[in-house]
Image (tube, coloured by chain):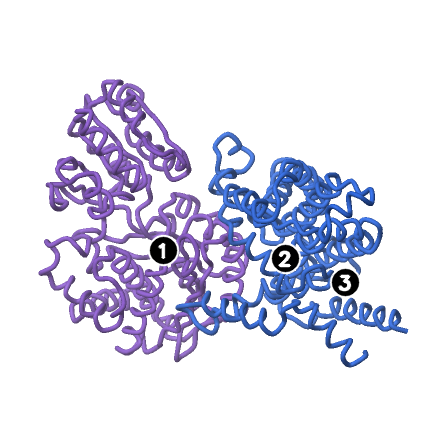
Amino acid sequence: MAIDRKRLLLIAVLVGACVLPFLLTNYRNFQLTLALIYAISILGLNILTGWNGQISLGHGAFFAVGAYAAAILMSKAGVPYWATIPVAGAVCLVAGFLFGLPALRLEGLYLALATFALGVAIPQILKYKGIEIWTGGVQGILLTKPRPPEWLPFRLSRDQWLYFVTLFTSGVMFLLAHNLLQGRIGRALIAIRDHPIAATAMGIDTAMVKSMAFGVSAMYTGVAGALSAFVVGFVAPDSFNIFLSISILVGMVVGGTASIPGAIFGGLFVQFIPNISEEISKSAPWAIYGVFLIVFMFLLPMGIAGALRMLLVRFKL
Amino acid sequence: MMRLHLLLATTAVGLALAASPALAQKKYDTGATDKEIKVGHINPYSGPASAYGTIGKAQTAFFNMINDTGGINGRKIKFITLDDGYAPPKTVEQARRLVEQEEVLLVFNPLGTPPNTAIRPYMTESKVPQILVATGATTWGEDPKKWPWTIGWQPTYQTESKIYAAYILREKPNAKIGILYQNDDYGKDYLKGFLDGLGDKAKSMIVSQVTYEVTDPTVDSQIVTLKGSGADTFFNITTPKFAAQAIRKAHDIDWKPLQFLNSVSNSVAAVLKPAGLEKSVGIISANYIKDPTDPQWQNTKEYKDWLEWMKKYNPQGDTQDGLNVYGYTVAQTLVQVLKQCGDTLTRENVMRQVANLKGLELPMLLPGIKIDTAPDDFYPIEQEQLMKFNGTIWDLFGPIINARDAKS
């Protein structure tokens, strides 16, 4: 019975997500697309931090790598935009795995600092003159925003089309995460998070699982980066400052750690709360943002997803 | 205040005469009505470049004054300014919000080269003016055919270095030039202008070119290299911290070339003081706008008007901060453009008028500097004046130089 309800809810959400772009302006669709992109990257960080307990303050770096991979492929090699998504994901999978190997020696706060270093370094690395022919240096790379394809039976605006591309990609990524985390690997991740020694004793290859978690997490964030590259139509080092990394972390905690739907709430928070704060006060938008954050943490200590789960339990829905 | 109004009034009359009778009919695009004109603006109020947020605050204060004194041709300015934190994706989002949600007539003075680059294709495609942008890159005026909806304001880096090149060719034709520049677009833009300005002579005159990265701790070794090359003229294309280091090091190792310092770093307080005022005597730089800390302006009517406005409308603003002069002066340029538009407040006419500024002089530009544009000239300010540091302040000298003339 409960499963049926869940499935029903999922279908309702999906139908809603498909109808929504026809009711909203292009500008709102663009914002929703960005929120979905954040959601994918937040889900990625959640796999690493929520499920596996490794803290990263530098996921903006993988976001940047994914975005640049897509931008370089599109502008230099003429690869169609949709084909850049898996490539960017694969590049980040490898990058994340390799970063995860030495990071294994670091626990907790030390890992947080190491990833923080990666996050602050990336904008400057992207400006490095040795790779300027590909990255465009400080000026970045300007991309033409993809148009809806000709074969569509009905007309979509460019923003609607990009929304659906992003919705489809996030659907695939969320489904993958669901399958990955509900099974053996998910249990191994949680076991390592909660009791690493016991996990090793039970025969889990801790090092391998942790590195893979890093790789998969980076892959998700890289996919989000690739989407953002062509949805925004521009990449530059200034797009990926340390604040992006912090925003992804904030989104994860606010949405709900170790929760798949939580990532969506996190994405909405990251996208819309700064705008609402700015609306309230021009002179101190970040103070308002801080108030929002504190209120959320006090009222919803388990994140938005956690609070919803509690509500469902309380009212026996 | 009177002087400003008088000035704007006289130019407006002149232009009204030039306008054809066909304009008698009112015509509006989105964002303009009989009552108001919606002007969009994007500024970094947060993030790494938030110091520039001063500009947006000054402009808000300026349009408050305009509205209090009757607006423009009877219409009030509704100034909608948004924060992008200097992050290009956010700039794109805010530009779309201004155009699609707030429905502004135009987007005015967005700040920074990457943010402006990010929104230019969108602005072009939606045919919404992106005017008087706050960046010194050359790209904003390079190709009006390709980007007919975007125009800059301040002199470009290339404009400035062409002026130095012209001065060297005239005053010191046998100079042996050493150049230090920051290895990024900003440095290369300056360098390109300088090389273009020297023309065929560049090869024989430049004896050494060295670079540094923003991440370098010092430029000491570069200065030693330049001295070793035998250069007797030094073009210092650096940001404030490095400019101070270079000036000090040159003095300390007893290298005494004729020094040219890019305007990016010609702040007395931020560069010359840390370098040592006595070590900075004789350095040449260029400017186009009045420095509010310079005593030579402080008794003039123009400065007093500005100060009065600051006190009344922008009391939190720092009267030492040149950005408050900058914001004030760009806003005056927009007022002139909108005045010229008359009752035809269409986006197309905004672009036509912004490309039709003729000899516009503004109170806080250096005396004699004129803003000139044409359909094929998207560089509003192309004049600057040279100045030499006397140990306390910059002494302006020589005529106003136009980079166009400097080229030949």
Query: Vertically, is B184 above or below A306?
Result: above
Q: Are marks 3 and 1 in contact (CB under 8 Å)?
A: no
Mark 2: few/some/many CA within 10 Å (<14, 14-19, 20+): many
Q: Chain of mark 1?
A: B
Which residue is the site of mark 3?
A: A154
Query: Vertically, is B321 above or below B281?
Result: below
Kindly indicate whether the residues beneath marks 2 and 3 are on one polypeptide chain.
yes
Kindly indicate whether the residues beneath marks 2 and 1 are on one polypeptide chain.
no
State the image quarter where residue A83 is shown: top right
The amino acid type, in three-letter code, at marker 2 is Tyr
User: Considering the image in quadrants, where does the C terminus of chain B appear?
Assistant: top left
Q: Colour of chain B?
A: purple
Q: Are marks 2 and 3 in contact (CB under 8 Å)?
A: no
Measure the C-alpha gap from mark 2 to mark 3.
28 Å
Mark 3 vs mark 1, foreground winner is 3
Mark 2 vs mark 3, foreground winner is 2
Which residue is the site of mark 2?
A: A38
Which residue is the site of mark 1?
A: B355
Q: Secondary structure at mark 3?
A: loop
Mark 2 vs mark 1, foreground winner is 2
Q: Position of residue A78 (x, y in %)?
A: 66, 38
Q: Are marks 2 and 1 in contact (CB under 8 Å)?
A: no
Of the pair B407 and A205, the residue shown nearer to us? A205
The letter of the blue chain is A
The amino acid type, in three-letter code, at marker 1 is Ala
Closer to the chain start, of discs 2 and 3, is 2
User: Considering the image in quadrants, where does the N terminus of chain B appear?
Assistant: bottom left
Left or right of A15? Residue B60 is left
Residue at (85% x, 73% y) in the render: A5
Of the pair B72 and A123, the residue shown nearer to us? A123
